[in-house]
Amino acid sequence: MAQVSLTNIQAPIPGGGALQDVNLEARDREFLVLAGPSGCGNSTVLRLLAGLERPSGGELSVGGRVVNALPPRERGVALVLPKGGLFPQITGAANIALGLKGRHFSKAEVGKRAAAAAEVTGAGDALALRPAAMTAGQRLRVALARAIVGQPKAILLDDPLAALDAETRAVFRAELVKWQERLQTTFLYATADPLEAMTLGHRAALFEAGRLRGVDAPRALYERPANRFVAGFLGRPKMNFLAGRVQTGKAGVVFKETEGTVELALEGERAGELAGREMTLGFRPEDVRPALETESPKARGGRCQGLVEHVEATGADVFYTVQTGGHDVVIRGAAGEEPRGVGRRMAFDIALEKVHLFDAASGERIPLN
């Protein structure tokens, strides 16, 4: 079993803040992504597990064994640092072999195992090179080979793709998933990139200022965020958020935007219970679109109006930034449509079944059903 568990973990975060009673478990052979903005504490979690830092409270366990008091080499984990952490004065092959230090293998066996690890990660062309002569991608492949050569129970990856360009990052995202499936080893992966949180792991654990704010499959977090932080962290462009109040009237229960034009009917059994409360309305750019002249205002949810302030055509999509009077709303246009000009008024429809309501004070999502 290669479960990795944190129970009531407390620890300072470099640069300020602290982990606050974090409870989290990476399941056996799971790829778990720890994501959040810089300084959120996800890298600190990995360093605690690796033994580079000590918690001020709580319990760390790997494979069912408490490791708080164990030296790093005895914990059964391997850590890959952001830029690989290779020793500059030795070759790639020698760096990989360091993963077997203290294991009492013969020189021939060390070479054999290092070559096998390099084959898994595609680091063969960097074995004779020193880190300064390697590309960023080669350094990462060598660092990963060094991590897996000792067959640890868990591999900890601290933002390993940070030094790569966008195209190379895309290649490595796909390869990391393949390597984890091939090795069947528990992976814990820290990142500040929402795309990596969505695409890499079986589950994602999202951190904000030392607090664990949500843990679930990425799609579940995206579609049913527990709070505003989770909703806003995942997805690009980001979710739209509008401050306002829930009211009742002739049209039933509606959300009325503060100092803006958006007034949206709310559907759900619990909508009436929210009347009079200050709320934040959330909806994603793909769940709102420019209204078609041939559709009635009720054809697809709530129809609203705004002034087009910015148009961004990316090739496959067109995104409009529309000013409602109180907020800027990002709207994704239909695929292939001709972009409409800045300065024009635009009617847009919001899909009612896709909206979220968040308590204005706590940020927690309030289900409508």
Image (tube, rainbow, N blue to C red):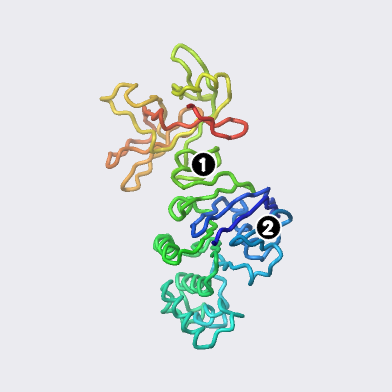
Q: Position of residue 98 (x, y in %)?
A: 57, 79
Q: Position of residue 12 (x, y in %)?
A: 70, 55
Q: Label 2, on which residue?
A: 14
> For the image shown, how many numbered marks are present on the structure?
2
**Is 308 left, or right, of 274 in this rendering?**
left
Q: Nearer the viewer, residue 255 or 320?
A: 255
Q: Label 1, on which residue?
A: 232
**Is 341 left, or right, of 19 in this rendering?**
left
Quarter occupied by the N terminus:
bottom right
Q: Nearer the viewer, residue 160 or 290?
A: 160
Q: Residue at x 45, y 52 (%)?
A: 195
**Is 11 left, or right, of 239 in this rendering?**
right
Helix, strand or loop status at disc 1: helix
Amino acid beneath label 2: Pro
Callout 2 crowding tier (Cα within 10 Å): few <14, some 14–19, many ≥20: few
Q: Residue at x 45, y 31 (%)?
A: 355
Q: Position of residue 221 (x, y in %)?
A: 48, 43
Amino acid beneath label 1: Gly
Quadrant of residue 340 within the rendered picture: top left
Please identify the residue farthest to the top as the structure is shown.
250
Disc 1/disc 2 C-alpha distance (Å): 24 Å
Quadrant of residue 303 within the rendered picture: top left
Helix, strand or loop status at disc 2: loop
Q: Residue at x 34, y 21 (%)?
A: 298
Q: Position of residue 167 (x, y in %)?
A: 39, 61
